[in-house]
Image (spheres, rainbow, N blue to C red):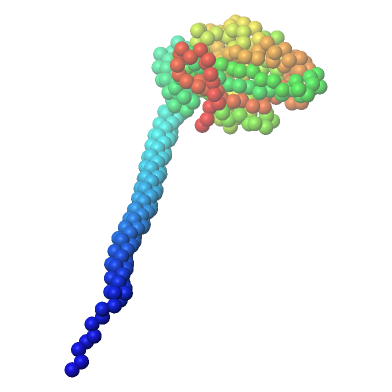
Amino acid sequence: MQLPRCNNNPSDSRNYDDNEKDSKVRRQTNKRLGRVLMTVGGLVAMGLLISAGQGFSTKNRLRQQQALVLEEEKHHQMELKLKLEVEAEERERHKVALEEKTAVFDKIVREVRTIKGTGVIMETDPKSLEVTGRLKVAARELCKTKYGDYIDQKPYRLAVTIQYQNDQFSQEEQGGHFVIEMAPLSLQPYSVYNFMEVARGHHTDASGSGFHRKAGHVLQATMSSDFAKKPLAFQEYSKDYPHKKRTVGYCGRPSGGGGCWYISTMDNTQNHGPGSQQQKNPHEADANFGKVISGYEVVVPKIRQSMPKEGFLSDRSDWVLITDMTILVPANNDPNDEDNLYVEWKA
């Protein structure tokens, strides 16, 4: 039997050892490389997880923000809806109150007209005084409900726009305006309310509105209006608001029919005050409802100059037209407001 040959060649032994070392080195290198790869992979995976987490967090925040915006919008819509409901309820309450007070006012006006028709001297008759007293209260309450409740120191105002129709003035001077301050509601409530209604219903085409009479003591106008067409139910007058220069009052007896009124260009306490223009009743007077507080010095001379003659003017081309009447109310109810601002009344 042949035995295996023993390799006694030294070079072969060295080759084996070297191979063994190389294998060991490779194994160690592979292990280190594996650890490195595992570390790198872990870092990459961690980065991906972090990125994914950040992406999720960003999306979550966006969803939260969107939800918050939607919630705020929902809350805003609810507030707006509630506000509109409250405003609608307030308008309805105001409408009902206005209807009720108008009905009361109209009923008392009919009572007063009936008494007036008997020919009794209303200024001294107890029954007449009681009914006209109730009418004043009803007119005051109705006026406050319709046009606003303001203190006596801040009465309503009317801005009156006029137009001259002749060639005496340049194109720029063809128009003018003045301001009437209404009498306090504590003194002349019925007269004030009546003329506020005349102004509210004034026809803007001015076809039937204008100054049509020039006299030494007054400039008289007529108004075309949808409201308050009848004369006053009685001659309301207050000794605390007489027919001084610049005041405005109703013409005619009974006063105010067809929107007839005038500007006093002198003190007319005797001409239009108690006992004037008739002999039967020493107490009866024209009803006064306000005074011109702005524009008088400019407008009155130009109206006189524009109207071609004294007396009533039948030709409307000679009139000074009233083209607009704007109701003005206080911007606030503060008696200490130094600015005393007024704004246009809105129905």
x and y percentages locating residue 270 in the rendered image: 60, 5
x and y percentages locating residue 210 in the rendered image: 68, 23
x and y percentages locating residue 111 in the rendered image: 44, 25
Q: In the image, what residue occupies the spot 30% across and 76% down?
A: 12
Q: In the image, what residue occupies the spot 43% across and 13% down?
A: 125
Q: Residue furthest bottom?
A: 1
Q: In the image, what residue occupies the spot 63% across and 22% down?
A: 160
Residue situated in front as seen by the camera: 52 or 82: 52
Q: Is residue 126 visible?
A: yes
**Is 24 left, or right, of 137 in this rendering?**
left
Residue situated in front as seen by the camera: 70 or 37: 37
**Is 275 left, or right, of 322 in this rendering?**
left
Q: Which quarter shows the N terminus?
A: bottom left
Q: In the image, what residue occupies the spot 54% across and 24% down?
A: 343
Q: In the picture shown, does residue 337 fall above or below 204?
A: above
Q: Quadrant of residue 129?
A: top left
Residue situated in front as seen by the camera: 277 or 225: 225
Q: Quadrant of residue 230?
A: top right
Q: In the picture shown, does residue 322 fall above or below 77?
A: above
Q: Is residue 127 visible?
A: no
x and y percentages locating residue 267 in the rendered image: 62, 6
Q: Residue furthest right?
A: 167
Q: Quadrant of residue 141?
A: top left
Residue situated in front as seen by the camera: 38 or 321: 38
Q: How many marks?
A: 0
